[in-house]
Amino acid sequence: MSVPPDLPLLLDGGTGTALLAAGMPKGCCTEEWVLQHPQALLELQKAYADAGAQAVLTPTFGASAPALGRFGRAQLVREYNLRLAELSRRAVGSRVLLGGDLGPAGLTCAPFGETPFLELVAAYAEQALILKEAGVDFIFCETMLSLTEARAAFLGARQTGLPVMVSMLLNEQGKTFSGGDPLAALVSLQRLGAAAFGFNCSAGPHAVLEALQAVEPYAVTPLIAKPSAGLPGVEPGYLSPEAMAGWTEKLFLSGARVLGGCCGSGPEHIRAMGQALHALPAAPVPYHDDNIIASTETEAFFLNEDLETSEPVECSVDMADALLAAAEPGCDAVCIHLKSVDDAHEFAGNAHLLHLPPAFLAETEEALESALIHYQGRAVIDSRSEVERDVLEALAQGYGALLF
């Protein structure tokens, strides 16, 4: 299946803030505390199911090997994910769906950090495959801080063969925390095959609503709205269950078909949101056509049917000047000549300097696939590449690229 059934889908609410209210110390390893105090999770997730949530998420937000490694627990990634998923299933049984939750790993990829991109993909794949073994119904990648992180989580999680949803965190300016454009993230991830895409937590429902309204005209996948309610007694903007329900109609009418709550929201918020959803008339998922859109992490581009590309740019360690010169007015995409996998890696190290979509002109399948993996956006594949047409089509479909 491409998405869990019965859209709109009502998710659960906040887990971390509810556990803090139940006595969990700040700054501890959440996953370890839950295993030491299982009753707190069992009661919370049962309450969410009783309140009408159609899916709950496993308390595995920080259970990737890199995240657990900050507490000296990286070697327990398998044990923790299996046990935590089993606890969630025990809480709700088979009456609701169970989503395997993946959160930020806390690593920064090259060229801005030291972590190779495929190493981050592997860390997410490891956790997602364990959660699949534990019996989850879908994977939910949430609070992603950048398109790079979101792509790594998705590429790792899709190895499970389960539906994978991706939700990003927005800053006060309505951008991703890396400064990226939410529309660029949507374009890239929906064409990779995300079962749903959207936004969680952030500055509350108004921030999520504004982002939804910006991306909805270009969505070809269901949109996610899982906003924060704030913290009672701490944040002046805290939203009551009734106030959160008041936002539900606006979020739904702006395209959200997977809804829930994040920090500060509890079972009563989910109950109120569910009641608001039931009062709304049925509406189809608003699909749109984006075949002429490509993106980088910071921008989205609308490509003409008569795509004009630059002269081929050769890859090298320092290709910055060539990239900047190629992206002159008059071309819609920069042609990147890929002779080898090494070329793909050289381009990946310089791709952040490119302010137009790349059009990969490849001599080998391996070079093309490596470039598509490492480019953090939606690329164009030049059909003049020295690769069989059926292979080009398969790679375009697998990595969400536009074959031209």
Image: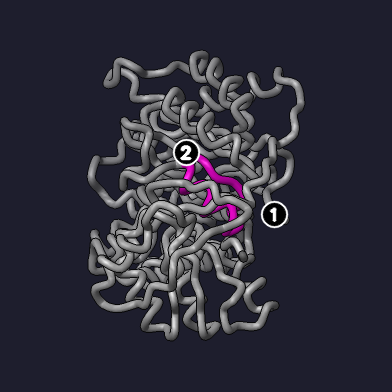
Question: x and y percent of residue 320 in the render?
Answer: 26, 66
Q: Residue at x 29, y 20 (%)?
A: 235
Residue wearing tag 2: 199
SS assignment at label 2: strand
Residue wearing tag 1: 2
Q: Identify whether 91 is placed above or below 78.
A: above
Name the mark on residue 226.
none
Q: Residue at x 28, y 71 (%)?
A: 319
Residue 312 in view here: yes
Residue type of the residue flagged with mark 2 = Phe
Q: Identify whether 118 is placed above or below 163.
A: below
Tell me, yes or no, whether the highlighted magenta stretch contains residue 185: yes
SS assignment at label 1: loop
Q: Residues within 10 Å of mark 1 (few under 14, many from 20)?
A: few
Count of all numbered marks drawn on residues in the image: 2
Q: Residue at x 34, y 58 (%)?
A: 105
Q: Which region is colored magenta?
A: 183-199
Question: x and y percent of residue 281 in the render?
Answer: 75, 21
Q: Identify whether 189 is placed above or below 119.
A: above
Tell me, yes or no, whether the highlighted magenta stretch contains residue 309: no
Q: Earlier in the sequence, mark 1 or mark 2?
A: 1
Q: Quadrant of residue 107?
A: bottom left
Question: x and y percent of residue 167 in the render?
Answer: 48, 45
Residue type of the residue flagged with mark 1 = Ser
Nearest to the observer: residue 59 or residue 242: 242
